[in-house]
Image (tube, rainbow, N blue to C red):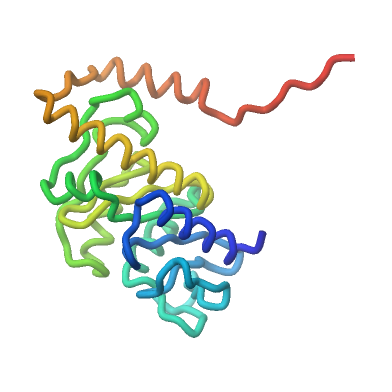
Amino acid sequence: MDDRKTLIAAAQKMAALGLAQGTSGNLSLRTADGILITPSAVPYDTLMPEMIPLLLTGGDYGAYRGRYRPSSEWRFHLDILAARPELGAVVHHHAPYTTALSMARKEIPACHYMIARFGGAPVRCAPYALFGTAELSANVLAALEGRTACLMANHGGLAVGKDVESALAAANELEALAEQYVLSLAAGGPVLLSDAEVQAALEQFGAVYGPNVPKQEEG
């Protein structure tokens, strides 16, 4: 599938999953030519390939090609993918439980072994900064150190991956973990896993959560 169509499909799936409302949130995808990113203020269900701008990774910072201006959050997309060459995509959403925790400025502690899905505990909450600013981008980069997801104070959440499908899956799982944590707080608060238990979960993830490749038929 064409990269622009892949990005649009992910954006529309994000909305269908209930992770985005209206035109909130944004997605980006690394390509050989630069970074494709969803445009600002365009409903996901109306996106067409020609509407997707391309952030240029050489030359002037923030330069792009296309008729539509990039998402207002282009800075942290560009900066994350520049700082983390192992990554290929970024998904940012304003999903309800993730955003509720961000409004309370709460990180997600080691409340469930799925914390290992994001590189360990905690899933940090980046300090508040105005959306679209260099300050916010710097805060997000720091919160993502050693992690594949973070919250942004009074804003929402963000997840990354090797491609846009895996980044979207991580963003969806971040919202699920945020919901479970919020519900556990209402039940009296979670019993947190120890550092050793989190480390064991990280090792188990590395062993069993890789690609499930079918065995070759014998004979």
* Rendered residue at 34%/57% (across/down): 20
Compared to residue 122, the image places residue 128 above or below, namely below
Total marks in image: 0
- The quadrant of the rendering that contains the N terminus is bottom right
Out of 48 and 63, give the one closest to the viewer.
Answer: 48
- Residue lying at the far right of the rendered structure: 219
Q: Quadrant of residue 74?
A: bottom left
Q: Residue 141 at what x, y percent from top left?
A: 30, 53
* Rendered residue at 51%/81% (across/down): 66
- Residue lying at the far bottom of the rendered structure: 67
90 relative position to 112: left or right: right
Q: Residue 211 at what x, y percent from top left?
A: 60, 31
Q: Residue 147 at what x, y percent from top left?
A: 34, 40
167 relative position to 129: left or right: right
* Rendered residue at 57%/72% (across/down): 49
- The quadrant of the rendering that contains the C terminus is top right
